[in-house]
Every structure is written in structure tokens, then in C-alpha cells.
Amino acid sequence: GAVVSQHPSRVICKSGTSVKIECRSLDFQATTMFWYRQFPKQSLMLMATSNEGSKATYEQGVEKDKFLINHASLTLSTLTVTSAHPEDSSFYICSAPDSTTNYEQYFGPGTRLTVT
Amino acid sequence: LAKTTQPISMDSYEGQEVNITCSHNNIATNDYITWYQQFPSQGPRFIIQGYKTKVTNEVASLFIPADRKSSTLSLPRVSLSDTAVYYCLVGDIRGGNKLTFGTGTQLKVEL
């Protein structure tokens, strides 16, 4: 089946710095990708919809200036956590729907962010 | 987006059949029902999807009654490796619309 990758798989950064997470659809094109955040023992929370060639759409309560999303190509979306703080430590997951398989959504393996 | 209700947790033993029911009373005409499985520190994995009646694949079956206000994921002969969180999602997937996750069901399989 289709594959979505994320890089890095885990990252540790210092408070105040920025970190970029990449999400790639490896064998299909995705005009839309989604970013989720998941805290321990909780469900996935949708953060934003990444749209190729246009601005991302953020869910209510998600700071667009803090979580910068860029969807520069049909296979790549990036999430940049700017001025990271310890409370941003979480598991970040992206997904992409594949239009060739009835829009089945494929999820990446996730990125564990730890802010110290 | 239709709200879903699932049991928080379920326990089972190896070799048994497990049925997880999801309620979605306000499901819309264009909504599909999709189930995902998630292991700790991994992204969710697609299990099965359906619109009505019964759908079966190599790992599970999905039963949807005529009124579509609920659905049941059936896992035949579970093993320890099926211990995971199972999410029921309801939404119009056409065009790659966003999916909203509910609380999920933590399934624990023991020997």
C-alpha cells in the first residue's frame, strides 16, 4: 500500500529554538496533507490541513504563527514548530489521502518532539 | 463531522473473536465509516472502511446496520499483537476531507 514517511522520527531541541518536521508521500501525490498532535494516553488532535500551493487551514485554537506549515510540492509538507517550549513536546503525526484508493488516508510513523 | 462513541477499553484472550461497537447517531448521508489501529508511538494504520451492510478483508469485518447509526468492527481470533487502540472515524472521505479522531478503544489481549 501507499507509504507516508516522516523525518526525523525523534528530535530533542532546546526551549526557544525551532524545529522542522517533514512529511512525504512516497508513492502517490497528495494535494492535501494533515498534521496531528498526540499527547500521551490521548487521541490524535487535528492541528491543520496542509494545502499544496496555498495557505494551510488551522483548527481552532492552533497558533498558525507558532506552527508553520509549508506544502511546497505534491509529495512534501513541512511543519515547523517555532520558538518551541516544553509544552510543545508531543508526538506529531501527518497523514495524506490517496486519490487513487478512494482517498484512503495513510499516516506517517510520527515524530517524537522533546523540548528541554 | 459526526461524533462517535466507543468503549474506552476492552479485554480479551488469544484466539477469541473481538467485536468493538461504535455509535454515530448523527452520521450524514455522504459519510463513510473507517477504522484505524494504533500501536504506541506509531501512526494509525488503516483496518477497514465501509458505507453500509458488511465489508470483509483479510484482517477484519465491518458490520453496518441499515440505519447506519452504529457499526461493529470484528476481529477474528485475536492474538497478543492485536493489543492496540482502535479508532472509529466517520466522515465524508471524498476529496480527501479531514478526519476527526474520537477517544478510541484500548484493546488488551492476554494469553
Image: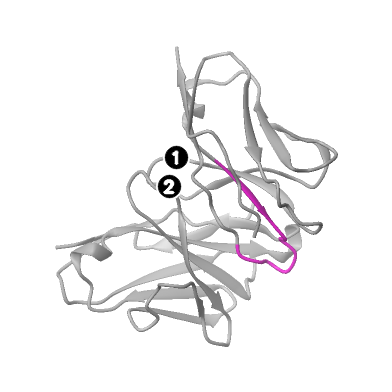
In the depicted view, which residue is nearer to us: B111 or A59? A59
Residue A68 in the image, given as x and y percentages of width and height: 39, 80
Question: Residue at (72%, 61%) from the top-left corner?
Answer: B92
Left or right, residue A6 beside residue B88: left
Question: Residue at (72%, 65%) from the top-left corner?
Answer: A99
Cα distance in 3D space between marks 2 and 1 = 6 Å
Rate crowding at label 1 as few (under 14), some (14 to 19) or many (20 or more) other CA atoms within 10 Å: some
Kind of residue at disc 2: Gln
- Vertical comparison of B53 with A21: above or below: above
Is residue B88 covered in magenta? yes
Question: Residue at (64%, 60%) from the top-left corner?
Answer: B1
Question: Residue at (64%, 63%) from the top-left corner?
Answer: A97
Is residue A38 covered in magenta? no
Q: Quadrant of residue A32?
A: bottom right
Q: Quadrant of residue B71?
A: top right
- Vertical comparison of B58 with A42: above or below: above
Kind of residue at disc 1: Phe
Residue A48 in view of the camera:
yes
In the depicted view, which residue is nearer to us: B100 or A70? B100
Question: Which range is magenta?
Answer: B87-98
Label disc, if present, on residue B42 of the rendered structure:
2
For label 1, the SS is loop
For label 2, the SS is loop
Q: Which residue is mark 1?
A: B39
Left or right, residue A18 beside residue B81: left
Residue B88 in the image, given as x and y percentages of width and height: 61, 44
Image marks 2 and 1: residues in contact by CB distance under 8 Å = yes
**Disc 1 chain ID:** B
